[in-house]
Amino acid sequence: MRLDTQETVAPEGAAAATAPIKLRGMRGMIAAKMLQSLQQSAQLTHHASARLDALQELRDHCRGRGLAVPSLQDLLLRLIVQTLGDFPALNATLEENCITRHAAVHLGLAIPLPDDLLVAPALFDAPVLRLGELPEARRALTEQARNGQLGVKALTGATFTVTNLGRSRVHHFTPLLNLPQVAILGIGGVESRAVPDSDGWRAVEVIGLSLTFDHRAVNGAPAAAFLDALCARIEGLAADAFDHEL
């Protein structure tokens, strides 16, 4: 018996779409840093979720008072910096078997660049920036990154990094450490969850938080305590907490 065979025809333009991308230049440097991160540290990730009711109420309060309405990202960054003040073990670096806990919080912000590249420059002395100053500081850092104007100090000076997936369905993920830092916080997407109330059930928005830490420098309990404290700060925020900073 003869079996007829069908020749598989590649879609038009498929050959032109196949092209090797060499890991060189900035892409090569990023790839090498990521591999080094996994090979030279003991990484573990804790996940948590925080309700956003209080942050939304704060933003509504600002609208009603005619104040500048802070973005969700800037509110989270401000609360992260405040929480780090209570957990110096996470605002640290580990080099040559020596842990250095830094008095100043230099907040690394992961910034995507064209061609799927990524940098995480430092927002130096982040605690002294008022909430109303954060948007301009972030914009300036982003412009410098995209224009190739970041110096070595900015690219290597962060003591703790935050990476944000923005409007994504990914609620939790596993960010890689930016060595020699011992911790990085990933902000995931927002999702709705049903919670009980006096009338039965209602929907609330929650945000995913993922903390990767170097287990050589930070144990699981203090890392969990940091996430617990951050979530409590997010969920317990007073509506007028930042009036003086706007």
Image: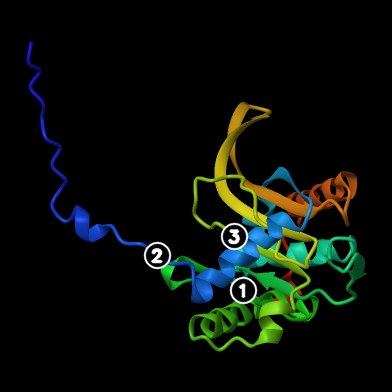
What is the spatial separation of the Cα atoms under label 1 and label 2, in whole angstroms?
A: 48 Å
Residue, disc 3? 164
Task: Name the one closer to the observer, 19 or 226.
Answer: 19
Crowdedness near tag 1: few (<14), some (14–19) or many (≥20) residues, C-alpha within 10 Å: some
Q: Secondary structure at mark 1?
A: loop
The tag on residue 67 is 1
Q: Which numbered disc flags the more N-terminal residue, 2 or 3?
A: 2
List x then y, in percent, for residue 1.
8, 10
Q: Amino acid at mark 1?
A: Leu
Q: Quadrant of residue 172?
A: top right
In the foreground, 115 or 18:
18
List x then y, in percent, for residue 73. Answer: 61, 63
Between 85 and 34, which is closer to the camera in this rendering? 34
**Residue identified by numbered label 2:** 21
Tell me the distance, in whole angstroms, between the alpha carbons under discs 2 and 3. Answer: 26 Å
- Decide which of tag 1 and tag 3 comes sooner along the chain: 1
- What percent of the width, then of the height, locates residue 79? 75, 63
